[in-house]
Amino acid sequence: MTDVSALGGIGEYGRNCFLVMDQATNTRIMLDCGVRNGNPEVYPPITETIAQSIQTVFISHVHNDHIGALPLLAQKGFTGDVWMSEASFRQLSAILGKWHDPLINNLHFRSFAKHTRGQAISFTEDFSITWGYSGHMLGSVWYSLQLREKSIFFSGDIVLSSPLLVTDMPDKDRYEYALIDSGHAAQIMPYKRSLTNILSAVNDSSEKYFLPITISGKTCDLLFSLFQALPDRPFFIDEPLYEHINSYLHYPDNLRPERRERLQAMLQSKRLAISRQFEGPGIYLLENKPEGCHEINTNLYQGIDSFFYKSHPDKQDLKTLIRKVFAKKYIFFHSKQHDLDHILQDLSQYNHP
Ligand SMILES: [Zn+2]
Ligand SMILES: [Zn+2]
């Protein structure tokens, strides 16, 4: 019997942590190990029994809501392998030191070689895994697990059409379970509409506009799209964001090849400056808000005319995903209970082929 269960992430936004148990193949693995962000952070209920019985952990990407409980997993006695993409591995190295927890060294962090993308990688005679890029941030991946004749799909956080990052689709398969990110599926917001809304709000070239950001795929996408759409305006960003988007160039397989040149041109352009404070008119993408500015909040959905820019599937994307990933049972994660109820209600009226 195959059993997929959640230690967090279903009916809430964050704390993504799932277990896959399969008696027939003696497989016990964990998919992501995150916390729910906030003060204090909320941890998944990882017990010693869980930590000491699972064999392997697979990480979809390095956002805190997918990796933040790794120190807890180590404290509870897990000492096995934690797998991820090469780009995630590189970014995680910078995060490990911030945890100040020596037990984290008991975990064995491993990365999939680039050339294994899209191929079944055998872990045991009965268990193999395939990964592909999920477009949500640099290094983010989905996983397709094969347990003898049964297969399970885990989307991780997924973005279907990032202007910069590649999104792979898994080979057509009939999955026993599909765990799918429905993070923004209570809304409909095409990227084009978001950009139109944002561009109409930043129309005065003598003004300073501030977009609050975190280091994420969404922020890089927004910067790139706005930079192309406003060819006469200066842009100001934090140094960590510059470093992060610059590192895209080190992972050409993760980057859409047709965008590489324009990304390089943007990073070398005099129109893009590193700054922490207001210098002059222009578009500021910063982590902290400076004084006296027009703020454009892209995180909050307030209807189809808002500045909201999605970083998870919206309602339309979710339907596209369901059309591409056939499963006997779908499990939607990354949505608060109220949104999840709404999503399930909407999908129950949707006849997918
Ligand atoms: Zn994420
Ligand atoms: Zn997430």
Image: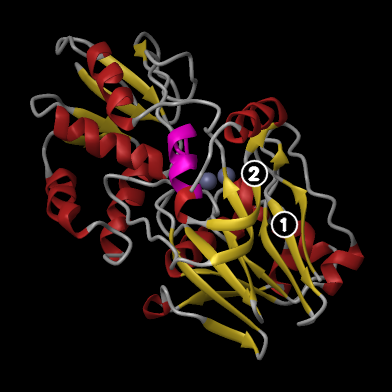
Residue 243, placed above or below residue 126:
above
Q: Residues within 10 Å of mark 1 (few under 14, many from 20)?
A: many
Which one is nearer the viewer's eye here, 259 or 188?
A: 188
**Residue 82 position within the rendered picture, expressed as x and y whole percent measured from the top left:** 64, 71
Residue that appears at 42% across and 23% down: 308
Residue type at tag 1:
Phe
Which corner quadrant holds the N terminus?
A: bottom right
The residue range painted magenta reads 311-322
Which one is nearer the viewer's eye here, 1 or 128?
A: 1
Q: Which mark is residue 174?
A: none
- Whether residue 158 is visible, yes or no, is no
The span from disc 2 to disc 1 (Cα, nearest Å) is 10 Å
Position of residue 335 in the picture relative to residue 213 (left or right):
right
Q: Residues within 10 Å of mark 2 (few under 14, many from 20)?
A: many
Q: Quadrant of residue 163?
A: top left
**Residue highlighted by disc 1:** 18
Q: Main secondary structure of the magenta part?
A: helix
**Residue 315 position within the rendered picture, expressed as x and y whole percent measured from the top left:** 49, 33
How many tags in the picture? 2
- Whether residue 329 is visible, yes or no, is yes
Which one is nearer the viewer's eye here, 23 or 196?
A: 23
Q: Helix or strand or loop: what does disc 2 sit on?
A: strand
**Residue highlighted by disc 2:** 333
Q: Helix or strand or loop: what does disc 1 sit on?
A: strand
Q: Is residue 29 magenta?
A: no
Residue 282, placed above or below residue 127:
above
Residue that appears at 82% across and 63% down: 75
Q: Quadrant of residue 222?
A: top left
